Image: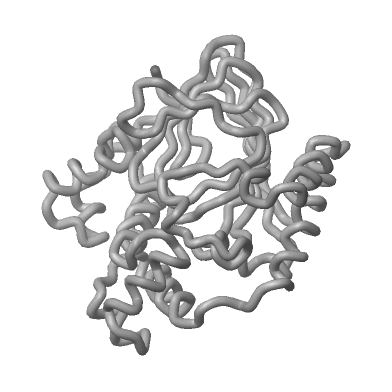
Amino acid sequence: MRGAAIAKCYLAVFINLMQLQPSPILSTVVKHYLVIECQADVYANYRIFSDGNPGMVFHFKRPLLQYNTGDITPKLQPECFVYGQITNYNNLCSAEEIGMLVVVLQPYALFSLFKMAAHEVLNATINLVDLLGSEARELEEKVMEALSMTDAIAIVERFLIRRVTRWDDGDSNVFLALNHIYTQKGMVNISNLLKVVPVTERQLERKFKEWIGISPKKMADVVRLQNFLKSLQKHPFYDNIALLSYSYGYYDQAHFNNYFKKHTGITPLQYKANNRLLTLNLMAVNK
C-alpha cells in the first residue's frame, strides 16, 4: 500500500494524518484509507461535508460526538460503523485523543459490499454489528486487538476481499455514468449523461438511488464542488475566487455563495483562509 503522512500542529492540538491506498483487488470498492490520530488537551471541533463517498469507521479511542445539521443534542458515534452519503455538513467534537481508521469507499460500495440500498443510509450511520451481527463483532474485535495500524488495515482488507468475491461486479450503467461525471469534473447535466448511458432518466435515477444514495445531479454537484476545492487550494489567497468559480460553471456568484455555505457551513473565503484542513471535506473549526 502506498501513502503519505501529514503532520499538522495548531493551538493545543497535534494531528497526524495518513492516507493509504488499498490493495489492487479492492480498488473497485475502496478509494483509500485514512488514519487520523490526534492529541488534544482542549475540546476540538471539526466540520465534515460530502465528498461523494460512503465509508466505514473504526474508533480506537473514544468515539466522536456528532451534531447532524439542525441537531441541538449530539450523538456519540458507535465504535465501528458504516456511513452513507451526506447532503449537508455535520459538526464533530472530541474531548480526548482521537485514533481512528476510516475506510473511504467508492460511491457505490455499500450496495456492492453489503447489498444494502444506499438511500437507506442517506445522512445516517449504522453500527456495523447491527448490520452484520456476529461477523461484524468478530471483525471489530480483531481490528481493535491489532498490534499496528498496518495489521488493522490488513484485517479489514481480508474481510472486504471475502465480500467482494461473494457478490457480482455491479451495474455497468452506474459505473459508466459515474465515470463520465468524474471525467467532466461534475460539469455535466442529465441530458449529457443520457447520451452516454443507454437508459432512461427514470431508470438512471432509480439506479443511483439504489447504488449511490443520491441522484445523478446531486452526485455531479458534489464532484464539481470537490474539484473546485482542489483548484481553490492551489490558488494564492488573493486570487479572484469569482473567476475560479466561473471556470467550474458557477455563473451566479450570490447563488454559489449560498450553495457553498449550505453544504459546508462557511463561505468560500472562510474555507480558503482555514489553515486547519485535514482533507478537502474535513477541517478543524472554532466552536
Tell me: 268 left or right of 83: left
Q: Residue at x 47, y 38 (%)?
A: 282
Q: Residue furthest right?
A: 147
Q: Residue at x 33, y 39 (%)?
A: 264
Instruction: State the image coordinates of residue 247 (x, y, percent, origin top left).
Output: 24, 60
Instruction: State the image coordinates of residue 273 (x, y, percent, origin top left).
Output: 35, 31
Q: Is residue 76 above or below residue 184?
A: above
| Front residue (pair 94, 118) | 118
Q: Quadrant of residue 61?
A: top right
Q: Is residue 42 above or below residue 88?
A: above
Q: Residue at x 51, y 79 (%)?
A: 171
The quarter of the rendered structure image containing the N terminus is: bottom right
| Front residue (pair 33, 169) | 169
Q: Is residue 264 above or below residue 95?
A: below
Q: Quadrant of residue 116?
A: bottom right
Tell me: 159 left or right of 48: right
Q: Residue furthest top?
A: 41
Asked if residue 183 can be seen in this view, the reply is no
Instruction: State the image coordinates of residue 174 (x, y, percent, origin top left).
Output: 45, 75
Tell me: 100 left or right of 277: right
Instruction: State the image coordinates of residue 281 (x, y, percent, origin top left).
Output: 44, 43
Q: Residue at x 76, y 43 (%)?
A: 137
Asked if residue 198 can be seen in this view, the reply is yes
| Front residue (pair 168, 23) | 168
Q: Residue furthest bottom?
A: 198
The quarter of the rendered structure image containing the C terminus is: top left
